[in-house]
Each structure stands twice: as C-alpha cells, then as structure tokens.
C-alpha cells in the first residue's frame, strides 16, 4: 500500500497525526500550521488519503476499498514511523476516521481532536439549504477553479482567502494529477456508526468547530462534546466548514499544544532534554514559562500559596532581615516572606516568570529580578540572612548541581540561614525536577555553612547556618 506522508519536527517528540477530510490531500494542512505545532515539541504527521495526492489511486468510480480501509490507513502511517500511540486530529471525514480510531483502536490513540465533524446526523440539524442546493446542482470539483468555488461554499465569507485557497488547489491538482479519483471517497459505503460507543472514549478530547459551519451546524459539535466523556469544546466564532483559518491559529495552536502536552511537567522534560543536549542547562525554564503564558501548557509551578514546608518552618521563627528566594518562579514563596516582614529579593533565570510575578503582585514590596544562579551578580553574594532554595538545584542536570549548590550557599550572610526544600530520591522518577539524594542535600554544608538538621518528610527539608563574624 503506497501512502504518501510528510513529517515535521523530531521523532522523539509526541506524535500528532493529522487526518484530512474527504477527497482532501494533505496540502490542506498548511505547512506553516504544522511547523508551529512542531515548534511546540511535537512530531507532526500528515498524509494523502487513497485517491488523493501522491498516494495510491484507483479508477474513477471504482474505489476498490471501504471506509474501514481509510481507518486502517491511519494506522499504517503510524506504523511507517514506528509510532505506537499518537495524538489524533481529524477534520470533517477525518474526524469520523478519528472517532473510529478512538473507539476501535483505543490503544493507538493518546488524545483526540475533532475539527468540523459530526457524531452522525440523527437528531441534529441538517446542512444549510444553501449548501444543499449547491451540492444538488454542482458536480464534484474537477479543476482548480471548481475546487476554489467548492471551498468558498463551505467557508464563512469573512474567513475565505481566495488567493490562498487557489494556491492550495493548484498544488493539489499538480500533485494528484487531477481530481477525478478523489470523487471515489463519495462512493464508498458509509461507515458503521460508532456514535453509541462515544461514551467509551477515555482519552482527552478536544472539539474544535466553527459556529457558522453550513455542513455540520454547531449543534453537531455540542453533541460530540456532550457524548464524549470530559470533552472540551472550542468554538471558532464565525468560522465555517473549513480548516482553522490562519487568523485563528493563535487560538487553535496553543489549544492543540496544551491538549497534547501531557501537562507542563511532561513538556518541561522535553524542553530540558533539548537544553541539556545543547549544553544550556537553564535555557528551558523561560521557554516553559513562555509556553504557559501562551496557553500551550498549564502555567508551570503555579502555586497559589507558599510551600507548606516553608510556612511550617517560618511560623516558628521571629527573626527578620534580608531574605532571598532562589528560582522564585511566580513568586508565592517570596510574597509569603514579604508578608512576614522580611526585606525580600526574589530572582529567577526566566524573564517571563519574573514578568508574570511582577504583574501578579503589582503592590508587592518584593525586589523581583532576573538572575542566573550559575552566574550570580556580585551584590547578591553573602547578602542575605535567609536563603530559601525550593526545587531549583534539582531542576538542573547532575553535571551542574555542584556549582549550583555552591552558588546557593554563597548567598548566605554571616549568621544567616539556608532552608532547602527538595524532592526525595525514591527510585527512578521523571523530572525535572529530579529528586536529590541525602548526600546531595547535605552537600549544601560547604563553604562555611554548617548542617543544622535534615528532615525526611514528604520532601526533604534541611536547614544550614553560617557562623557569625566575630
């Protein structure tokens, strides 16, 4: 079976399989759209259906295959790339194929995104009278102009780009050798309904649908979102039955990336691996926070309150002075110390994190600043009566931990205290942050710092102190 496919991104990243509509080549999945997904650390696949593009063709009017074969083709594409599970994204007929994959081959589907598609017509509004009339009198497209007009009828006028559509249509015809064979998709037997099994779908599902879709009115999307457990509905206001137009990409791409991220911690692992491979151990922090701001992942380390282990520790202390929070993220720990009366500085290597923290607490007394723990500004060294280190060192690879540990210790002033909070080493765990061993925790007792105590709670909590001068 000869199926033409195309890939964007790196094979090590989570795979997204894009499945086009009936009679559609992969050209309708705009390469720029695919690249934006790939830039979010995804391996993006698109392919030509049978009888389209450069995939196998059958004589016009004699398809020689059925809908089940189109479902199997999607699995064949994954097999060609050695992919066991993928995030499946289907538009129109491709959305029907995606539903069948999720119901009949659940082990191959990581998540599901359904664009401009339907669970089936029963009990739902029909296509618009205008579109029904057009289909009744117009033959299947056979030229670029016919294809442009076909797409015009499906799209909303405000989102129809004639020049862009014509360019794609001409590329489709050039690659397909004409459009006659693509009409075979209209001749295959309708698929066995799976609507009664949509409740079995257990993977995260996103439904993306134009509110002005003339083929599948918006109620079809609402039915999908209602009948698939936990499905999320993303309306595209005023959009028709069409690929998400470029003006919607700033909404659709982040939504797809968030939906396929596996959570910010999984995305952190992917970005950290890239940075570490490029000998840039801290570069991934800002990329992750930026993805959070863009909506591509849930905002990382977004705690609404200070670390409970910090709160519990600080409650017993009455001394105040200058404090610093290392790798402060979005500022919850720093704001807590400031409320207790500490003159608090908080730094992070991520400009985005610092910007978000400053906006989140506009009346704050905290001195938020961008700084790199591995290249500390001289004015911070030895300047603080209390240093709080919460997960920062363990978010760095082991090759840089000794330097980071020494840098944290160097912040403590004479007579000052260092509080370290870290994940415990309990066997192989995903990261970052990666767990610290007891030996790594005790390694903060260097450069004049003495260990006061190490507590084995749900996390490590360790206290160190520097002797006073004189």
Image (cartoon, rainbow, N blue to C red):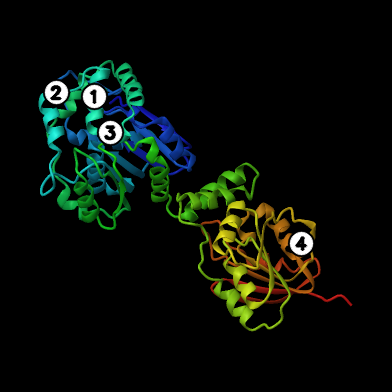
Residue at label 2? 138
Q: Are marks 2 and 1 in contact (CB under 8 Å)?
A: yes
Residue 304 visible: yes
Q: Earlier in the sequence, mark 1 or mark 3?
A: 1
Q: Earlier in the sequence, mark 2 or mark 1?
A: 2
Query: What's the mark number on residue 380?
Result: 4
Q: Earlier in the sequence, mark 1 or mark 4?
A: 1
Residue 434 visible: no
Circle 4 — which element?
helix
Residue at label 3? 157
Residue 466: horizontal and vertical position, in percent?
A: 79, 73
Q: Compared with residue 87, is residue 53 higher up or lower down, i.e. above or below?
A: above
Q: How far apart in space, not on screen, are marks 1 and 3 (Cα)?
A: 12 Å
Circle 1 — which element?
helix
Q: How far apart in space, not on screen, are marks 4 and 2 (Cα)?
A: 74 Å
Q: Earlier in the sequence, mark 4 or mark 2?
A: 2
In the rendered structure, the answer to whether residue 444 lies left or right of residue 361 reads right
């Amino acid at each position: 079976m000869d199926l033409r496919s195309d890939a964007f991104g790196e094979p090590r990243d989570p795979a997204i399989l894009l499945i086009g509509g009936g009679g559609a080549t992969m050209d309708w999945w705009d390469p720029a759209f695919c690249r934006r997904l790939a830039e979010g650390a995804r391996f993006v696949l698109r392919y030509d259906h049978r009888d389209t593009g450069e995939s196998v063709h059958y004589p016009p009017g004699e398809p020689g295959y059925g809908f089940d074969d189109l479902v199997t083709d999607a699995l064949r594409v994954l097999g060609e790339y050695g992919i066991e599970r993928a995030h499946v994204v289907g538009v129109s007929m491709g959305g029907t194929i995606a539903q069948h994959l999720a119901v009949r081959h659940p082990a191959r589907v990581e998540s599901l995104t359904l664009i401009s598609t339907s669970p089936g017509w029963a009990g739902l509004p029909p296509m618009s009278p205008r579109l029904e009339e057009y289909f009744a009198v117009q033959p299947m497209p056979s030229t670029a102009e016919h294809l442009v007009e076909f797409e015009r009828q499906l799209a909303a006028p405000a989102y129809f780009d004639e020049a862009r559509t014509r360019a794609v249509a001409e590329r489709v015809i050039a690659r397909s050798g004409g459009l006659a064979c693509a009409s075979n998709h209209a001749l295959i037997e309708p698929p066995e309904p799976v609507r009664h099994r949509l409740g079995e779908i257990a993977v995260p599902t996103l439904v993306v649908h134009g509110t002005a879709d003339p083929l599948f009115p918006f109620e079809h999307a609402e039915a999908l979102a209602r009948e698939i457990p936990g499905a999320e509905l993303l309306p595209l206001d005023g959009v028709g039955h069409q690929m998400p137009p470029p003006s919607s990409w700033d909404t659709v791409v982040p939504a797809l990336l968030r939906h396929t991220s596996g959570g910010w911690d999984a995305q952190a692992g992917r970005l950290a691996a890239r940075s570490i491979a490029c000998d840039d151990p801290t570069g991934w922090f800002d990329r992750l926070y930026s993805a959070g701001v863009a909506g591509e992942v849930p905002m990382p380390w977004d705690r609404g309150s200070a670390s409970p282990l910090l709160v519990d520790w600080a409650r017993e202390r009455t001394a105040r002075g200058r404090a610093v929070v290392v790798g402060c993220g979005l500022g919850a720990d720093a704001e807590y110390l400031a409320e207790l009366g500490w003159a608090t500085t908080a730094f992070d290597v991520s400009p985005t994190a610092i910007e978000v923290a400053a906006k989140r607490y506009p009346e704050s007394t905290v001195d938020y600043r961008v700084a790199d723990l591995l290249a500390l500004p001289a004015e911070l060294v030895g300047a603080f009566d209390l240093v709080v280190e919460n997960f920062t060192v363990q978010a760095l690879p082991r090759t840089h931990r000794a330097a980071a540990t020494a840098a944290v210790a160097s912040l403590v002033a004479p007579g000052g205290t260092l509080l370290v909070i870290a994940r415990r080493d309990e066997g192989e765990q995903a990261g970052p942050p990666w767990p610290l061993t007891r030996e790594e925790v005790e390694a903060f007792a260097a450069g004049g710092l003495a260990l006061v105590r190490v507590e084995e709670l749900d996390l490590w909590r360790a206290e160190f102190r520097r002797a006073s001068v004189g």
